[in-house]
Structures are given as C-alpha cells and as structure tokens.
Image (cartoon, rainbow, N blue to C red):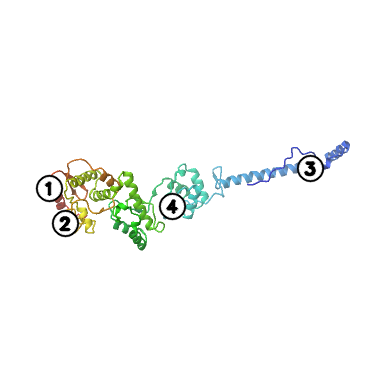
Amino acid sequence: MNRAPMADVSNQGPPRHWAGTGNRRRSARGTGRGSRGGRRRGSAPRGGLVAGIVVALLVVGGLGAWTWWNDGYLFGIETPLAAEDYDGPGGEEVKVDIPEGANGAVIGEVLVENGVVASYGAFKRAFDQNPDAPGIQPGTHTLLTRMAAADAVATLARNEIDRGGLTVPEGLTVEQIRERMIAAGWPEKKTNQAFENIGDHLPEQAGGNPEGWLFPQTYDVRPGKTPPADVVRMMVEMTISQLEDAGAPQERWEDVLIRASLIEREAARPEDRPRMSGVIQRRLDQNWYLGIDAAVLYGTGRTSGALTRAELDDASNPYNLRKHKGLPPTPISNPGRASIDAALAPADGTEMYWVTVNHETGETKFATSDAEFQELVAELRQWEAENPDWHE
C-alpha cells in the first residue's frame, strides 16, 4: 500500500499565533483560564476515546487483513472468510497439463479452470502446507473434478505424470506408426501428408526411405496441439540423436539401423540381442545367407503370420534373405536403443544359427553346427505340435 510521507515536526517552532506576544503574564493567564474551565478538562477523555477507537479499528483491520492473507483462517481457526473448498473425494477423471516453469499461482489457476479445486485460495493454503508441493513437475497429471484442495496438491506432488500422448513401441514399421497416429486422433489427411513429405527431415544416409528412422519411445505430443509433421520430425531427430549417442559413425548409420531392425524383430530377450548380432556378422563375413524370416515377411507386406513355401522360395522379394545374400536393402522395422547398441557391438563366438523354440515366451537357442541347428528345429516343431492353437 502506498502512503503519503509524514511531515517532519521535530525542528518546527511553536504555532505562528504564539510568535512575538512578549506577554508572559497574558500567556499564563490564558492558560490558567483554560485549566479552570470545564470544557478543557473534558477534552482529555474525548481524545482518549478517539484514540481507543482508532486502535480498535487498527486491530480489527489488522486481524481481518491477516485472516484474508491466510485464506480465511485466523491462527489456524477457520472463519467465515475461509476460501471455498470441496469436501472430496472427487468426481470424474480429468487430465490437467501443468506447463513448464509453472509456479504455485499458475498451477492453482489451472486447477480452478479445470474444475479440480473450488478456489484459488483453498489451493494456495494446501500448497503452502504440503512440503512436497514445490516439487510438482510439469506434464499431464490425472486428477478428479471437485477434489479437496489438499488431496489435489498431494496427487500432483506424487508426479504420476502421463509423459506423452504417443507411444511408439520398438519394432513397428513406418506404416504401423502412421496408422497408430491416426488412431490416436491425428487427422488422417494431414498425417498422410506428413509421411509423404517425410523425406524433408531424413538425413542423406537414409536414401529417402524412412524405415528405421522413426525412433520408438513415448513422445509428449497431442492431437490438435502438435502437427503430424512435427511429430515425424521429432522421431527422425531422436533417431539421429540416439545413433550419435551410441557412437555410430555417420557413414554407417543406415547399415547399423538395418542390422538393428533385424535384431529388433527377432529378439524377445535382452541377452539374445548381442548374440544375434554376432551371428549376423559371422554369416556376412563367411558369405552365408542370413536366412532371417522376419525380413522375408516384411517383403511380403506383412509383419506377422506364417510364411508359405511359395513365399520362402520367392526370389523376386528383395527382402528374402534365403534367396539374397547380404543385408536387406533397407531396415525392416524401427529399432530401439538396445538393438542399436547390439548392432554396434556383436558378441564374439562361433554361433551361426538361432531358433526361437517357444513362440509364446520367445525363448531362443543358438547353435554352432548344422546338426545342432536341426535339433533346435525339431524342438520348435514339437512345441508347435503341442500348441496347435497358438497364433502370432
């Protein structure tokens, strides 16, 4: 509150009408008359009364201001001035976005706007009383409408955040990611356009083909808030970032993603990835066919299901690694970081084969010789016979 400055009276002389009277006797007599009169004797009590009223008003005003500042609570006791609050426990579920850099004031306003708390005052009091409140993180929090302010603050402070609107699992193809975005709410037309123009974001090493370059993770994006083109760009940029962080030489980026994509589609357990990478490297070194059926399947335009004999024998499929030596022409999926790391660090050894002997658990076994390999194939056939109703 702005106040006018008080006048400095410390060096001022007597009132002007006293100046130059030179009559001490008259002055004294005047004073004497005043002391005898009833009017002056009564003035002192009236002044005390006024002063008492002023003090009382100041005290009441001060307590009122203190109560207002403390959201209607006076020394911890609720008064009629207390800010409105819900009793809880709450109603419908609501997603609330807490922006980056939001302080308590901003958070309170967001909750009031979303119908989570009844008033900013109630939220402020609950925020000030919760020692964990300053640690509330930005992101999407799941709350309820009509919550008690203390419950709302406690829920926020747990930081159980929905950190993204789009989750891309490892091993999906570009087409599957496009379909996933449309299903999540991005407009089909704009999403298709984003994928048609994806080459604008790809590095030269991709050769214009986006397969393998859309990094799988959870992205903090939302339909209606993040344009599809920005989502695609973020995925490509994240792939480049992961390749650089993994130490992949730039000239090998496409090669690494191709190997990683094969591993991603074949491996079910983390410990199998480096071993598969080792088998791939040794087969390439010895000019063997890779024979990886996941690549054959990709070339047919599918990502699941059994391959027919005709499909396995189809040499027109450039991804048929039973008929074409070397790596496939492009990645066959979008691999995660674990598969990228495995592609860069193949395990040493003599293993030349792997067979997934249990499709349900993903258990995979490795072999060095053809004879061992045939034993593993027999184990797989036995499992398939015992599980005729299992479908990938």
What label does residue 97 carry, if any?
Answer: 4
Question: Which mark is first along the chain, 4 or 1?
Answer: 4
Numbered disc in front, either 4 or 2: 2
Q: In the figure, is residue 219 to the left or right of 66?
A: left
Residue 303's quadrant in the figure? bottom left
Amino acid at circle 2: Leu
What label does residue 330 carry, if any?
Answer: none
Residue named by callout 3: 42
Asked if the residue at tag 1 contacts the one at tag 2, i.e. Cβ–Cβ closer than 8 Å, the answer is: no
Question: Which mark is first along the chain, 3 or 4?
Answer: 3
Question: Which mark is first along the chain, 3 or 2?
Answer: 3
Question: Which mark is first along the chain, 2 or 4?
Answer: 4
Confirm whether residue 213 shows in the render.
no
Inter-mark Cα distance, 4 to 2 = 51 Å
Residue at left offset 27%, top offset 53%:
333
Query: Residue 384: horizontal and vertical position, in percent?
Result: 16, 52
